[in-house]
Amino acid sequence: MSSQVEYRSRLSWALFAGIAIAVLAAAVARTEPPASGYGKLVALFEEWRDFERPPLLDGAPDYTEARLAKAHEELRRLQSRLMAIDPAGWPIEQQADWHLVRAEMNGLDFNIRVLRPWARDPAFYASVWTYQSDTPAHEGPTHHALVELWTYDFPLTAAAEAKLAGELRTIPPLLAQARRNLVGNARELWVAGIGNLRDQAKALEELREQVAGAGDELRASLDAAHRATLSFVDWLEEQAPSKTEPSGIGKENYTWYLRNVHLVPLSWEEEVALLKRELDRAHASLRLEEHRNRNLPQLRAIASPEEYERRANQSVTDYLEFLESQDVLPIRDYMDAALRARIGRFVPQEERNFFWTAVHFEPTTLWTHFYHWWDLARMEAQPHPSPIRRGPLLYNIFDSRAEGMATGVEEMMMHAGLYDDNPRVREIVWIMLAQRAARGLGSLYVHSNDFTLKQARDFHVAWTPRGWMREDLDLLGFEQQLYLRQPGYGTSYVSGKYLIERLLAERARQVGDDFTLSGFFEEVDALGVIPVSLIRWQLTGKDDEIRSLMGR
């Protein structure tokens, strides 16, 4: 048997064994009394998830200070019950599930103690979402009664009309409650959040045109939601001059959040050092690529809708053929459709944001980042056996794996030979890494209150090569606001990439000559979209990072 076949055989058995263990655990959870073992953890997880969703107040989720104070007391009891469950001796996969529950509970604790989005962040009260996130759940803190317009097909059926009308009815009482809850003094969160509510008003106006022929119930709910949103925007603007304090959470809180909620084994200071290094590496590598390619023709941007349609679709075909022919990644049935559904359309040059500038030079540079959509398709087509990791983790705990893998694959595919026939494209990969490192560094300095949002945006623009990140594009403001709202997210692209690369190196060292890229990606994907530190523990058996995150 060849070494590669032998490794694949071992990998298949390992994956089969892991799935079998999880299936057995799920069966045990259904049959054994919830007083001991993994079944007790699953029961507590289900109770925790029910508890995490707030009760209703006047038809909207209750985020009042009094309710949250009581919730914090109950949370401590749930945490005590979790700590009373001793997972030692369980299979590593089940021990990892225990840590996922711990991380989620820590997430709510941090939100109540420090982040307090319901009290500091007006954007928390935005309800209307017109697009699907490319990660398992929306990036950033969101409330529990979102209106996911992207899930509706228009024209609406009678049942869909009734459902949408009911969802829109939560907006007026929620925004009325928000005026009482928003007692924070974080100026930049406040001012930036006004834009989110303005966007909601615009989305509701556009929805009104889409449902012009709808029944009285939907039109009444829509009109009430629109009026409440406009009134809320006016109130936010009236209050804005009184908001005077910085919005960052500080280095100590940032580090606690990284380590105890997102299970990232780094500190604020270590992330600064890492992102500085990656920013320098990206710029230096770009200059070396430019020198290497100095005698080659410059890349030419796509110039018409017809050319875009042709090149975008052909690039999907070529990318998948590369992955299969070079044994880089196992090909699944959903992969082609998942990419083609997201190729977008031609955008005039003056309207292109950073990423669509890259796409119009070479579409594949963004398709590699679209590993995201394969993650989501896999979660739907092949639900994980563990009920704890089957759906999206709360509080964006998935970010090191989701964003780290998507960003890491951009460079990995380049090194694996994807652009060997067009070396100029390698320059784009380094530009993309520089942009990710620059925006992440800016977000770190905003959270330490060394930068304002404006300074972070200026840094972001200045350190993105070739002027591809512009001050006048919405993407700039969106990204820096998101990373202020969600600590750790702005750096997860680069820090998660680093953790994935380190895991690849460790796993290759363990497997030796039998290591293959396709085997590595298959192993990682099989474990779900969970923190890289837990994936590393399961694949390598090394628990040093997890012990350090527990303070042991």
Image (tube, helix red, strand yellow):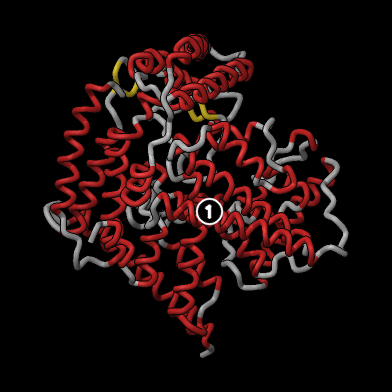
Q: Is 90 in front, or is 181?
A: 181
Q: Who's the residue at 18% across and 56% down the image? A: 31
Q: Position of residue 528 (x, y in %)?
A: 42, 57
Q: Position of residue 58 (x, y in %)?
A: 31, 15
Q: Who's the residue at 88% across and 59% down the image? A: 297
Q: Position of residue 196 (x, y in %)?
A: 53, 24
Quarter holding the C terminus is bottom left
Q: Farthest front residue?
A: 450
Q: Who's the residue at 64% across and 31% down the image? A: 474
Q: Who's the residue at 69% across and 30% down the image? A: 472
Relative side of 265 to 69, left or right: right
Q: Quadrant of residue 16?
A: bottom left
Decide if residue 463 is in sight here. Answer: yes
Element type at marker 1? helix
Q: Position of residue 363 (x, y in %)?
A: 73, 51
Would you place residue 469 above or below residue 190 in this image? below
Q: Quadrant of residue 413?
A: bottom right
Q: Is 320 in front, or is 351?
A: 351
Categorize mark 1 by other alpha carbons within 10 Å: few (<14), some (14-19), many (20+): many
Relative side of 36 to 371, left or right: left
Q: Which residue is mark 1?
A: 275
Decide if residue 220 is in sight here. Answer: no
Q: Residue type at mark 1? A: Leu
Relative side of 513 to 550, left or right: right
Would you place residue 536 above or below residue 108 in this image? below
Relative side of 132 to 401, left or right: right
Q: Is 332 in front, or is 420?
A: 420
